[in-house]
Amino acid sequence: MRREVDFLVIGTGIAGLTFALKAAKVGKVCIVTKSKADETATKYAQGGIAAVMYTPDTYEKHIQDTLIAGDDLNDEKAVRITITEAPERIKELIELGVSFDKNASGQYDLAKEGGHSEFRVLHHKDQTGLEIEETLLARAREDSNIEILENHFTVELITQHHLGMYVNRRTPDITCFGAYVLDRKNNSIDTILAKVTLMASGGAGNVYATTTNPPIATGDGIAMVYRAKGTIEKMEFIQFHPTSLYNPTEKPSFLITEALRGFGGILKDINGNEFMQKYDKRLSLAPRDIVARAIDNELKISGEDHMYLDCRHLNRNQLIDHFPGVYAKCLTIGIDMTREMIPIVPAAHYTCGGIKVDEWGNSSIINLYASGECSSTGLHGANRLASNSLLESLVYSHRAFIDSSQKIKHVSFCNEIPDWNAEGTVMNEEMVLITQTMRELQSIMTYYVGIVRSDLRLKRAADRLSILERETEELYKHSVLIDKICEVRNLVKVATLIVKMALERKESRGLHFSIDYPKVIDTEVNIYSPED
Ligand code: SIN
């Protein structure tokens, strides 16, 4: 099938939906999602949205907290834009119907998380993401200018490369004309021509064996933009959430929100002793990179499989009222968190780098915008401050809308784009080729590219990934496409970018910690490989 739409949006999380709802006021919008529309990382966000709502909080305090957490690798302009535009964007979200908890005096009940100097996290119990996702999706479904295509997997972005022109990373005018999209039900590859495309496809937590991300988080957008010769940066900064529920057979790992530590939960070792005083004066509420490294170190020293989060001293009723989701989940594995400590381990949680965008969400490819976890705006630097990511999506999707709604007036469809050519491909009969590649990939990344890194481990990872990449590209070229082949191909590509950028960073900064370069250096590291 061939379609023409003004705006093509890839992804149905907060970034894609808030952009789509605005874009629908000026043109036809098609949103594609590889799974069901509500299966996004947004839905699983527990903590909330950080924003300055009342005194004694100030923009400046939130800005400084973001810069400190980001280990000074943030783009300060992006930080200031995001934080000062937050109240306006949050007001819009509330007008769309999203409800945030209030206290008895009618003010928003603000939570605190690691790295924040004030209480500033708006939340809906411990299910903020679910509240946002359901509300935005309901609004999008009501809008006659928005079409949502579920079970549609975006395979490749369309550029002049598909007109037979040679494109490399130095080509100055690479232009996006839409995307080739696999309709999973009909097994056909559709051509969707678009004047403007927004990549909002989320992160890549599934490069690791243990992640809080849903299975859909396979780095598709980042890999696609890289293959289309767009600029990707800061992929070495993978955030491990310090506290996922230790339950080895469960995938994805269940998140134990950092707001629980903001509420008074304390990290303890296997003997029930506090340990964070050895690492940081902010104790259990230090920024995530520090807490995750501390837990990793305690696990290595003790040889244990998990540490604990202790909430037993907190008010039982308030605990259950504020964290009903965590309480119910712990009960399912026989833990009453009001009486017993919660076993926790760090898990891959957030991709801080990604598709490099400017202050209006423009990627390096003309007419291609990016927002949300797949993008790199400069807000997070070397380590994202907790609950800054939903906010970043709101701000940058709005900015992408403002910019693209002007630009679109001067863009026309590129009708010369050919349909997908599947000649010479055959049905892959051996799923084991894909599942085993996935296992190998996750094992390489988990053991060689985790919280603490070294050149030796990174080089081993690079060598092994190059074999997986060769094999996967071969499989991709000769197979009738199915989503699983595309996903594993994307994950392998993203993993190679993480390792490559980690090897290039000869320092320890934020989330990237190398035993070979324990100090921070001043010079900025090359942002991407200009090899092709
Ligand atoms: C959490 O609730 O701890 C996660 C929030 C976030 O990742 O920002």
Image: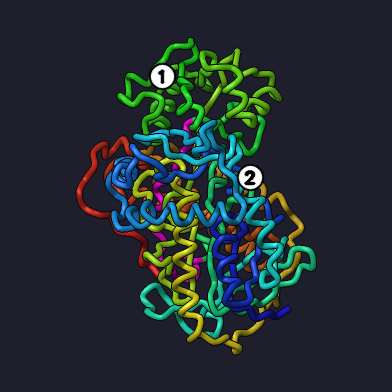
Res 256 quadrant in image? top right
Res 386 quadrant in image? top left
Number of numbered discs: 2
Secondary structure type for disc 1: helix
Q: Which residues are magenta?
A: 225-242
Q: Amino acid at mark 2?
A: Leu
Asked if residue 232 is among those painted magenta in the image, a careful observer would answer yes
Task: Name the residue at 39% across, 41% down.
Answer: 54
- Disc 2: which residue: 130
Q: What's the CA distance linking mark 2 and mark 1?
A: 38 Å
**In front of the other: label 2 or label 1?**
2
Q: Nearer the viewer, residue 329 or 124?
A: 124
In the image, is residue 396 above or below residue 102? below
Coloration of the structure image:
rainbow
Secondary structure type for disc 2: helix
Res 289 quadrant in image? top left
Dot 2 surroundings within 10 Å: few (below 14), some, or many (20 or more)?
some
Contact between labelled residues 1 and 2, with CB atoms less than 8 Å apart: no
Asked if residue 393 is among those painted magenta in the image, a careful observer would answer no
Task: Name the residue at 48% across, 86% down.
Answer: 410
In this view, the residue farthest toward the bottom is 416
Percent x, y of residue 157 = 56, 72
Task: Name the residue at 48% across, 11% down.
Answer: 272
Dot 1 surroundings within 10 Å: few (below 14), some, or many (20 or more)?
few
